[in-house]
Structures are given as C-alpha cells and as structure tokens.
Amino acid sequence: MNEQRRQILEMLADGKITADEAERLIDALERQQPESPPGAVSRPKPRPKYLRVVMNSSETYGDGPTRLNIRVPLQLLRAGVRLTSLIPPQALTKINQQLDKSGVPIDLTELRPQHLEDLVEQLDEVTIDIDDPDSQMQVFCE
C-alpha cells in the first residue's frame, strides 16, 4: 500500500473525512498511477463495491426452485467498522465475551478501518463455489 493511500485511510480513521470522500480520493489516486510502458496492455481492476451471495437450489418451496441473491454494499461494512469506535469500551468487552461464548472469536476492539480496506482489496480475487447435489452457492465481490 503506498503512502498516499495510507494517509487517506488514516484521515478516515481519525474522522477527518467521510468514507465517501476517502473513496473518491483513493479512486483519484488510482487514476493518477503512472501508465504502463508502451506495448503492455493492462487495465486496473475496478474497485469492488458489493459483496454478493448467490444460491440456487433445485429443491422447491412453493411455486418453484429456491433462489437467494444478496448484494451487500461494501460501504455498509465500512460504516459498520467506523461505528465500532462509538461503542464504549465496557460494552465492547461484553460483546466480545458473548461472541466468544457463541464460538465467534472476533475481538471488536482490534477492528480498524484500514484492516477492512486491506480485506476489501483482497476480496476482488475471492470466489467460493459450494456444490452439492441439490444446490450451488457463490460468494464474490463485484
């Protein structure tokens, strides 16, 4: 991650800019990247905006086969990470204890916006296919 991108993410984490402003700044930085040498044809991948979950099942409920199609804006995830900074530390401790009891080993006190951006950056490469005789599920970013 380059220094300018890191500075933008730090301004976002400090609340100096909004997530939309950070996204516009990062997009502007990506457009300013030096072009590749002549003869090399490469286009930068567009930044993913949604997390998609698609499920098709041959089992029928009601009128026909079951289909699930969920599209979650990644901006919603970013906002959720920022909201964790507003939760009092005592509440975060209790939440972490309950999550741990439920078998979800996540420490919300360690969650930072820059971690989410690193995750989102890698999600554009993720595609998960789960097949069984009756259904197919895909999880991917677009």
Image (tube, rainbow, N blue to C red):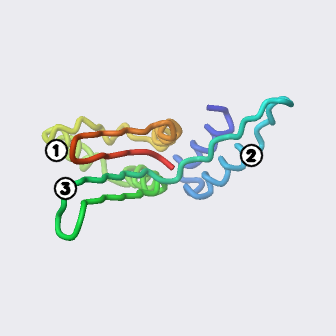
Instruction: State the CA–CA distance, disc 3 to disc 2.
Output: 46 Å
Q: Nearer the viewer, residue 95 or 72?
A: 72
Q: Residue at x 36, y 52 (%)?
A: 54
In what element is the residue under mark 1? helix
Task: Report x, y in % for residue 86.
Answer: 38, 54
Quadrant assignment, res 71: bottom left
Q: Position of residue 139 (x, y in %)?
A: 38, 45
Q: Nearer the viewer, mark 3 or mark 1?
A: 3
- Disc 1 from disc 2: Cα separation: 44 Å
**Residue at the extreme left of the image, as rendered:** 101
The residue that disc 1 covers is 98
Secondary structure beneath dot 3 equals: strand
Mark nearest the camera among 1 and 2 is 2
Q: Residue at label 3?
A: 59
Crowding near the residue tagged with mark 2, few <14, some 14–19, many ≥20 C-alpha atoms within 10 Å: few
Residue sitting nearer the eye, 103 or 36 = 36
Image-quadrant location for residue 45:
top right
Q: Which residue is mark 2?
A: 31
* As drawn, 67 above or below 91: below
- The amino acid marked with disc number 1 is Gln
Q: Position of residue 12 (x, y in %)?
A: 56, 49
Q: Amino acid at mark 2?
A: Arg
Q: Earlier in the sequence, mark 3 or mark 1?
A: 3
Q: Is residue 15 left or right of residue 80?
A: right
Q: Looking at the image, which residue is at 22% across and 42% down?
A: 133
